[in-house]
Amino acid sequence: MKNSAMITIAGAGLAGCEAAVSLARAGIEVELLEMKPVSYSPAHQLPGPAELVCSNSLKSDSIETAHGLLKDEMRHLGSVMLEAATEAQVPAGSALAVDRAKFSQAVSQILARFPNIHYREGVEVSALPAGEVIVATGPLTSEGLVAELQSRLGGGADLYFYDALAPIVDTESIDHDQVFAGSRWGKGGGDGDYLNCPLSEQEYRDFVAALKNAPTTALHDFENVRYFEGCLPIEVLAARGDETLAFGPMRPVGLTEEKDRPYAVVQLRCENKAKTAYNLVGFQTKLTQAGQREVIRMIPGLAQVQFLRYGAIHRNLYVNGPQVLTDSFQLRGEPRVRLSGQIVGVEGYMESAAMGILVGWFVSRLRADLPVPPPPPDTALGALYAHVRGQPPQDPYEPMNIHFGLLPPIRQRGRRARRQAAVQKAQQSLQTWLKTWKSA
């Protein structure tokens, strides 16, 4: 496809705007479509692009955190969102928080700098436009476009409408003296694939009582989540009866001899081959983050646990990236269509924006007949990319935000020293990648 052919981007959210500017900088004509201010989703209120809906925080800006590392990498790639955030920043300690209205206005001003970005307001995309297109419409994609994506995916088997996420915790923060390894009835992988936190009857009853009284996150008016019976929030199960969990996700059977059986067990499943992160099996939840910290730290072995991802259940729209996307985020079987942002299977503002930068990089390189080396897996960008590509595989595939558990493990003593080493390695790898990119 010729470099002069225009690319249409559906959705002027964070990912869509990042992709538009990335392409414009490469000299590519872009038509950026946004349905506001003619039409609004139930979640949006501001008329401009890049509206932050759920929070005005872009999370930590400290380079010693995974979110800070991702921002540092995005700055090196000329992130529009971080430029706008600098203009709209409000005090928030070590976090990067913004005035939402000023943030959106700053993004508008950046878009206006590029004569090859044709920003069209009031255009609701209910069907895939002709030609090359990037779909960056986010979790509240219009019903017509959702239906068309479903048809492209063979009936929608790989299209999901909400997240049901269990917390993920840092392996190093687990008290391994209080847990034991083992799979139920010895099935599945090795024992290290699962860790088990045993609870006595009194510990179980105290846990259930605390769970019932813990604060939950209120639903947005637009969510109207319909839970599947096989994927109910842990607090909903607890409300059905004091013994429901002991006969459900916390059942203690198949792990020990009958005489040694605890009253209940919380099972943790490893998230990666390096076993740097574990998922609480069956613990999808709408508890607030504070509520999750309070309740989950009551579990034996998890008193000091550090959360890499909090549990959540909320409306979302995402595809099974490893199954339906190519290495450059094209739909398999229809290469003119690319997806970007939250829809590819990431969580969070910056993670979505990062996917916009990457898809712009992919398209501009391919248009120029240049090689398209993906970001290195030991960078934050590369770790997110590897997640979307299913490396290592996930079953089931779930949206993910950035955390150190996604990066390759560092063999070094001390948690802080390991993270510092991981950051240093990521920075070095990014610079090498950028030199390769710019020299081609």
Image (tube, helix red, strand yellow):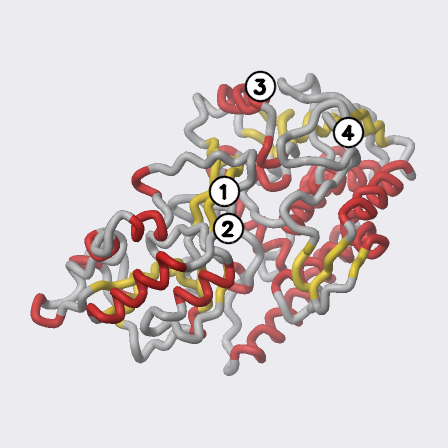
Q: How many numbered tags mark residues here? A: 4
- Establish if 257 lies above or below 417: above
Residue indicated by mark 4: 32
Query: Which one is closest to the eye, mark 1 or mark 3?
Result: 1
Q: Under tag 1, what secondary structure?
A: strand
Q: Name the kind of residue labelled 2 in the image.
A: Thr
Query: Mark 2 and mark 4: span between their CA atoms?
Result: 34 Å
Which image quadrant is residue 366 in? top right
Look at the numbered disc 3 and give the secondary structure of its residue: helix
- Name the side, left or right, on which 246 lies relative to 12: left
> Is residue 298 depicted above or below 7 in this figure?
below
For disc 2, the neighbor class at 10 Å (few under 14, some 14 to 19, many from 20) is: some
Given contact means CB atoms under 8 Å apart, are the residues at marks 1 and 2 in contact? yes
Mark earlier in primary sequence (1, 2): 2
Residue hosting label 2: 217
Q: Is residue 370 visible?
A: no
